[in-house]
Amino acid sequence: MKIVLDAMGSDACPEPEVQAALEATQAFGDELILVGPVEMLKSRLQALPGGAQAQIQIVDAPDIISMEDKGLALALKAKRKGSKTSMAIGMDLVENGQADAFVTAGNTGGAMATAYYRLGTIPGVERPALTALFPVMGGFCTALDIGANPECKPEHLLQFAIMGSVYAEKVRGIKNPRVALISNGEEAGKGNELVKGTYPLLEASGLNFIGNVEGKELFGGQTDVVVMDGFTGNILLKSSEAVAKLLTDLISQEIRNSNSLRAKVGGWLVKPTLKQSLKKNLDPDEIGAAILLGVNGLVYIGHGRSNAHALVSAIRTARQAVEAGLLTALHTAIQERLTSTTILEAV
Amino acid sequence: MKIVLDAMGSDACPEPEVQAALEATQAFGDELILVGPVEMLKSRLQALPGGAQAQIQIVDAPDIISMEDKGLALALKAKRKGSKTSMAIGMDLVENGQADAFVTAGNTGGAMATAYYRLGTIPGVERPALTALFPVMGGFCTALDIGANPECKPEHLLQFAIMGSVYAEKVRGIKNPRVALISNGEEAGKGNELVKGTYPLLEASGLNFIGNVEGKELFGGQTDVVVMDGFTGNILLKSSEAVAKLLTDLISQEIRNSNSLRAKVGGWLVKPTLKQSLKKNLDPDEIGAAILLGVNGLVYIGHGRSNAHALVSAIRTARQAVEAGLLTALHTAIQERLTSTTILEAV
């Protein structure tokens, strides 16, 4: 197995990437490809203990997509045949079969555009969806779209549901995953036009569709997959993180400002356990990156703030998807489900 | 000042309502109107200590809107001239000037429909918006719409922004409140079609519009008012509550299951402070109800699970709005802001 890591993605690149590449080869035992300016990467790598002997292949990419790139200039960098950005060259390696998956902590829009133009989409998928794991009671919920498509149609959400279900089954190991729509009310018929239009498509899809859910059911762990447009999903993801931060900040503040010795002593005693619990349950670095489901290749996009630990997690996550045969399973499911839904609609 | 309380709203009605009416008259010193089946309410009230002497006027309403009412039947109950539901009769008292505000913990859709038909809207407002206070770092953010309108147009969001700003200024006492749009990205130009269409209207509105915010800024306390469609707002509200619950559940679980004596002792010591902190900062019962901004009268809608404490909080909140002259201020602001925005658009 061979994973390509974009060396020029994160805000602090290439340090975290070079470090992560080294740790990943040591942890997983496979060769890894690092893509970026070859001379610079070589010297950075050799400066690290064990770097000179590491099973790391460096592929040269002199150009980068920065966090500031956007609009037409970005689209051109993503699409152009001879593009020499680390994303373009890295994804071309996936496209021509020299690598199994691509991982970056770079510009999300740039990674999505590069993937769309260079890998294309799985036949039947109109819009790739950015897919995250939300921490919920008892585990994780596969959530999509968390931001690739602010505006969606019901058919897009059907495609997301099929892909999310395959992901939950193949990579997360959940048999017959429960699939839900998030809505402003659990009852069928509640929702905006998009949800109302998607509901019958999911009912007819053959997926294990459990209907609409609200926050309570979602974070209570009552569904394995949740589907929504990228505007809603992005707000949901970022707000959940912000509420968790608000709550932990409020708690620390209350203990710090408390006049009660009891509270202060209790806070000091309980702190390591709380920290560990929050890290275990809620730390996005443990997952490392979101997968862009629907492009014809495995692409993981991590946060710009990713450190080496988060990047190693992302590589681990990508390896699991390769091992599970995710891409082939997605092709098959999209073909089967979309066909059966279309037939049902026609009846 | 006279507040009307719907005696037949909450899931456990009329016990919490009768209790709350008694407590509110004792706490605030004004007469209060309780609306519902007169004989039943009289006997329930007299059974309470101090109930016989309470400054409570009971207005008869033999019919109710239940939590099960919906669709056309609900619309008819809400609209019909001779309707004898406690909501219809209570809001008619507000409409004809015999009372200053209406409070219910009943069917949200029923209360919204009854208010819409019986009070009408403030001239210039097309859609009333359900408005809540989100707990954020350092205080509260006035958030609308949290569920009245799953589908909105930019003009609706402009109207919400004007009303939310007036509410924050008059009732919450915030000078020149900051107004923001929640979106999937802070930069101007990010968002779905609705947000993109609303952005220029808010820029031209004369409000203190600070642009788009994400969850981090919203829950970090960087805006006083946040505006969105009712689908997004409802999901945001319920998911925030669910995340807060998940986090506190995870923490308790971690402490309970911990093998560390230190964590157990610490947890026991710190528990009262945490409980008090969460109650003070995040308990919706402390606010009691959401206001339906945009109807031509003050209408507060609480949760069906409301207890007497939550209902007293709702009455207190309603009294603050009456004292602040909220309704008149809304009329004035809508007229001024909408006119200036329309002129700017025409230029």
Image (cartoon, coloured by chain):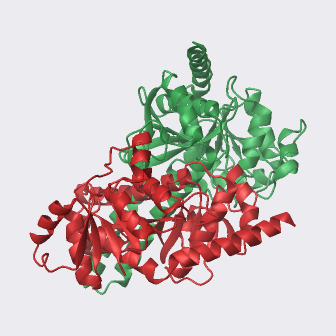
Chain colours: A green, B red
- Residue B143: give x, y in percent of width and height: 53, 65
Task: Measuring from the top left, give residue A134's x and y in whole percent.
Answer: 48, 47
Name the residue furthest front.
B82
* Residue B98 screen position, x and y as percent: 38, 74
Q: For residue B228, which quarter of the picture?
A: bottom right
The total number of labels drawn is: 0
Q: The C terminus of chain A appears in which quarter of the rendering?
A: top right
Residue B80, compared with residue B40, is above or below; it is above
The reply to whether residue B94 is visible in this rendering is: yes
Q: Say which residue appears at 56% left-offset and 80% top-offset.
A: B169
Seen from the viewer's position, the closer of residues A287 and B127 is B127
Identify which residue, B60 or B87, lies in the foreground: B60
Q: Is residue B282 visible?
A: no
Q: Is residue A184 above or below residue B299?
A: above
Residue pictured at 57% horizontal, 48% vertical: A233
Task: Classify B165 as above or below A177.
Answer: below
Residue at 37 percent of width and 40 percent of height: A222
The image quadrant that residue A193 belongs to is top right
The answer to whether A252 appears left or right of B203 in the picture is left
Is residue B156 found left or right of B235 in the rendered image? Answer: right
Nearer to the camera, A27 or A175: A175
Q: Quadrant of the N terminus of chain A?
A: top right
Q: Say above or below: A194 vs B252.
A: above
> Which of the 4 image quadrants contains residue B187?
bottom right
**Position of residue A26 measured from the top left corner of the image (x, y, whole percent):** 57, 44
